[in-house]
């Protein structure tokens, strides 16, 4: 099957349309960050940088860290951008862009998101490293694809829906992070748990300014959730699509976030730079 130019969109240089990347510019271990300014904060630890690509909000540096080829890519904010990034990263390694045909031999990427989040457990101090075991999506990205969720994912989703009341029209889905990557990233320095991926920063996370959220107390019921030792520990905006689409395409995906807000205590970090640098080095040393 040949993918037509309206489905597999390439630029004039033959690079994937949004990321502006070619296959030879991408490593198979990838760190994704939302903020394009954070790309350089990661790549400054590389021994050397081989490629620097910038297109729209997508910045990518590919180089070597302690002998390992690594790329760091900015995604922007939200699961809609994750849909673009995962689709185009997969195309770079699993589609021949010249012939526009699927490769017989598939490549599995390791993709780790480093981000920031709001914490939902009151006892967690600011700047806690949060390692996602699963992500519950309040977005709709996964509903556009034929994704088969396993029995444990469906069981955990059912328990969440039974204990937590979401607004009418919200159809959550739940996907696990890759267990091998979670094991690599786990230590006594992180807090593991379920992540809630919202489709926005304000109302979808229970924040109310002039326009009131329909779930202003949602963080209280999220904090109280418990099922077979699983807790919901944080809010962010990308991991559900990352885990669901990544796994469906055969890639290994995980997320580690820096807790910059404690929602139950209503406190927000005044400076994250030093803690974020520590998290970046933590991830680099483990992937």
Image (cartoon, grey):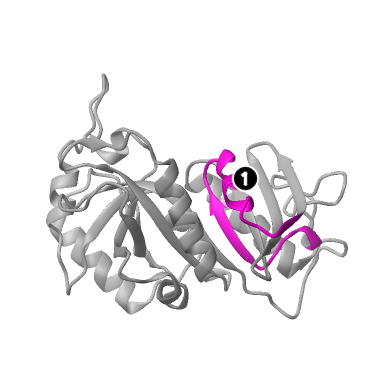
Which residue bears the numbered disc 1? 40
Q: Is residue 142 left or right of residue 134?
A: right
Q: Nearer the viewer, residue 240 or 65?
A: 65
Residue depicted at x 16% and y 50%: 165
Q: Residue at x 69, y 60 (%)?
A: 47
Please identify the quadrant where the C terminus is shown. bottom right
Extreme-top residue of the structure: 210
Would residue 196 be visible to someone looking at this image? yes
Position in image of residue 251 (x %, y %): 57, 70
Q: Is residue 140 visible?
A: no
- Judge from the rendering whether residue 67 lies leftward or rightward of residue 192; answer left or right: right
Residue 37 covered by magenta stretch: yes
Residue 109: image x %, image y %? 61, 69
Instruction: Name the residue: 31% across, 39% down.
Output: 204
- Specify whether 195 is left or right of 147: left
Label 1 neighbour load within 10 Å: few <14, some 14-19, many 20+: some
The correct choice, above or below, for 108 with respect to 260 in the image is below
Q: Is residue 247 above or below residue 197?
A: below
Q: Does dot 1 land on a helix, a strand or a loop?
A: helix
Is 243 in front, or is 66? 66
Residue 54 in the magenta stretch? The answer is: no
Residue 97 place in picture, x, y as percent: 82, 61
Residue 218 sits in quarter: top left
Give the number of callouts: 1
Q: Residue at x 47, y 44 (%)?
A: 78
- Tell me the magenta residue range: 24-49
Q: Quadrant of the N terminus?
A: bottom right
The extreme bottom residue here reads 105
The quadrant where residue 46 appears: bottom right
Where does residue 198 sit, x and y in percent of width and height? 36, 46
Image position of 95 (left or right of 187):
right
């Amino acid at each position: 099957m040949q993918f037509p130019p309206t489905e597999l969109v390439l630029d004039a240089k033959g690079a994937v349309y949004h990321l502006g990347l070619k296959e030879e510019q991408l490593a198979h271990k990838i760190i994704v960050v939302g903020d394009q300014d954070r790309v350089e904060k990661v790549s400054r630890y590389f021994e050397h940088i081989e490629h620097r690509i910038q297109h729209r909000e997508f910045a990518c540096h590919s180089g070597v860290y302690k002998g390992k080829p690594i790329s760091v890519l900015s995604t922007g904010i939200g699961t809609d951008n994750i849909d673009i990034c995962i689709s185009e990263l997969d195309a770079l390694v699993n589609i021949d862009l010249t012939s526009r045909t699927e490769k017989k031999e598939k490549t599995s990427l390791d993709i780790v998101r480093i981000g920031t989040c709001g914490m939902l457990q009151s006892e967690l101090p600011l700047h806690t490293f949060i390692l996602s075991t699963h992500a519950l999506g309040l977005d709709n990205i996964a509903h556009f694809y034929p994704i088969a969720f396993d029995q444990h994912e469906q069981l955990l989703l059912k328990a969440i829906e039974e204990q937590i009341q979401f607004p009418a029209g919200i159809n959550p889905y739940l996907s696990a992070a890759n267990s091998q990557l979670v094991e690599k990233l786990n230590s006594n320095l992180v807090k593991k748990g379920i992540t809630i991926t919202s489709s926005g920063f304000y109302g979808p996370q229970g924040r109310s300014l002039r326009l009131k959220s329909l779930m202003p107390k949602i963080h209280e019921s999220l904090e109280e959730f418990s099922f077979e030792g699983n807790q919901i520990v944080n809010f962010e905006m990308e991991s559900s699509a990352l885990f669901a689409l990544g796994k469906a395409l055969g890639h290994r995906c995980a997320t580690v976030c820096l807790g910059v807000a404690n929602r139950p205590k209503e406190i927000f970090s005044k400076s994250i730079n030093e803690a974020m640098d520590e998290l970046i080095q933590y991830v680099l040393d483990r992937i």
